[in-house]
């Protein structure tokens, strides 16, 4: 089976096995959601001595991870985004970021992908709150090939890091030749009319929108940002200078996440009009992804409309 034919949670488990086989200082930590994370039985079965399940105790998982990191180990801690970011924010602040320890935090099921679990488990602010954390790098890969490369980067480099892990199977954006470039955006489509910036899950919808707009004669420059922090400032400014207008789309609250950092970046370096698409400062609800995309206005059609309006604004 090819890498992109697997659910991304299983890619996560298999890549952890690769990493542990190369370095036994790497540990897999879970808070009783290992099947949802794709590490049970994948990692548990192959490397039980490098697998720690702390139970339903996410804050304790961060404390255990910090202890392991202080002894030279490299812990990967996975749980739902709402627990990995919101619930344990104070523990991450003091035990990981303030102490500047080498802990890797993996938030699974970001944004609307938690649809069946409803508003309590649907975290729309993890990018925003983790961005505000010193000593924290943030990643949101869009497919299996990028996920593998980002995980390898995380394991090989020191520092607190947060990864948004999509759990479902997704079409390939890249292939086996992909090389992750830390701190840079990936230009997926070149164009002169409008800059479209996406990250993680929404990159798939952005690609569809950009291709359809091209058929209408609107040439979108599509930038995918696997690195949300540090943010690819130079790449974003260069594209904004080229097109003159920007649209962002993210599986997050439009406050503080990708749209927020794009606005902060451009207001300081090259002010242009920016339209932010995502969740408009609301909580989630039990619903399908399709319903939530339509309700909150960041489906493929919404992306197309925003790009069209942005081009009109230039004229």
Image (cartoon, grey):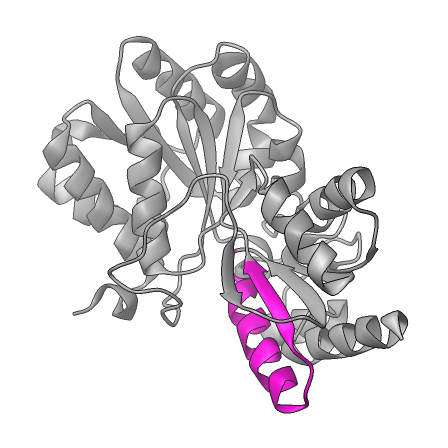
Name the residue located 27 percent from the left edge and 56 percent from the top edge. Answer: 10
Task: Examine the rendered structure and indicate whether residue 297 appears above or below residue 125.
Answer: below
Toward the viewer: 289 or 207? 207
> Which quadrant does the C terminus fall into?
bottom right
Name the residue located 75 percent from the left edge and 72 percent from the top edge. Answer: 295
Name the residue located 16 percent from the left edge and 42 percent from the top edge. Answer: 18
Left or right relative to 17: residue 9 = right
Residue 202 position within the rendered picture, expressed as x and y whole percent measured from the top left:
57, 64
Segment colored magenta: 200-223
Q: Is 126 inside the magenta-drawn segment? A: no
Residue 207 position within the rendered picture, expressed as x and y whole percent measured from the top left:
54, 73
Left or right relative to 136: residue 218 = right
Q: Is residue 30 visible?
A: no
Task: Examine the rendered structure and indicate whether residue 10 appears above or below residue 87.
Answer: below
Task: Examine the rendered structure and indicate whether residue 280 appears above or below residue 125.
Answer: below
Snapshot quadrant of residue 208: bottom right
Snapshot quadrant of residue 230: top right
Residue 12 position within the rendered picture, expressed as x and y whole percent measured from the top left:
30, 49
Toward the viewer: 22 or 81? 22
Q: Is 208 inside the magenta-drawn segment? A: yes
Q: Is residue 272 visible?
A: yes
Residue 180 position within the rendered picture, expressed as x and y whole percent measured from the top left:
37, 47
């Amino acid at each position: 089976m090819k890498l992109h034919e697997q659910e991304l949670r299983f890619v996560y488990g298999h890549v952890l096995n690769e990493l542990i086989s190369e370095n036994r200082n790497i540990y897999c930590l879970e808070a009783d959601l290992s099947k949802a994370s794709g590490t049970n039985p994948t990692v548990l079965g192959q490397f039980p001595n490098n697998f720690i399940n702390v139970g339903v105790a996410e804050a304790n998982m961060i404390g255990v991870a910090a202890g392991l990191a202080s002894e030279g180990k490299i812990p990967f801690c996975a749980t739902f985004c709402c627990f990995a970011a919101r619930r344990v924010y104070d523990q991450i602040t003091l035990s990981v970021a303030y102490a500047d320890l080498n802990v890797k935090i993996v938030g699974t099921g970001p944004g609307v992908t938690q649809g069946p679990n409803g508003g309590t488990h649907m975290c729309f602010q993890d990018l925003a709150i983790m961005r505000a954390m010193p000593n924290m790098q943030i990643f949101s890969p869009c497919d299996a090939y990028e996920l593998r490369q980002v995980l390898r980067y995380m394991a090989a480099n020191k520092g607190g890091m947060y990864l948004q892990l999509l759990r479902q199977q997704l079409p390939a954006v890249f292939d086996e030749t992909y090389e992750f470039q830390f701190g840079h955006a990936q230009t997926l489509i070149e164009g002169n009319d409008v800059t479209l910036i996406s990250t993680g899950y929404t990159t798939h919808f952005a690609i569809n929108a950009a291709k359809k707009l091209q058929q209408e004669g609107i040439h979108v420059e599509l930038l995918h940002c696997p690195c949300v922090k540090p943010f690819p400032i130079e790449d974003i400014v260069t594209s904004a200078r080229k097109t003159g207008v920007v649209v962002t789309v993210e599986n997050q609250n439009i406050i503080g996440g990708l749209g927020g950092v794009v606005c902060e970046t451009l207001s300081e370096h090259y002010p242009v009009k920016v339209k932010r698409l995502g969740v408009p400062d609301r909580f989630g609800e039990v619903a399908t992804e399709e319903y939530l995309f339509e309700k909150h206005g960041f489906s493929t059609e919404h992306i197309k409309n925003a790009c069209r309006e942005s081009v009109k604004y230039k004229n």
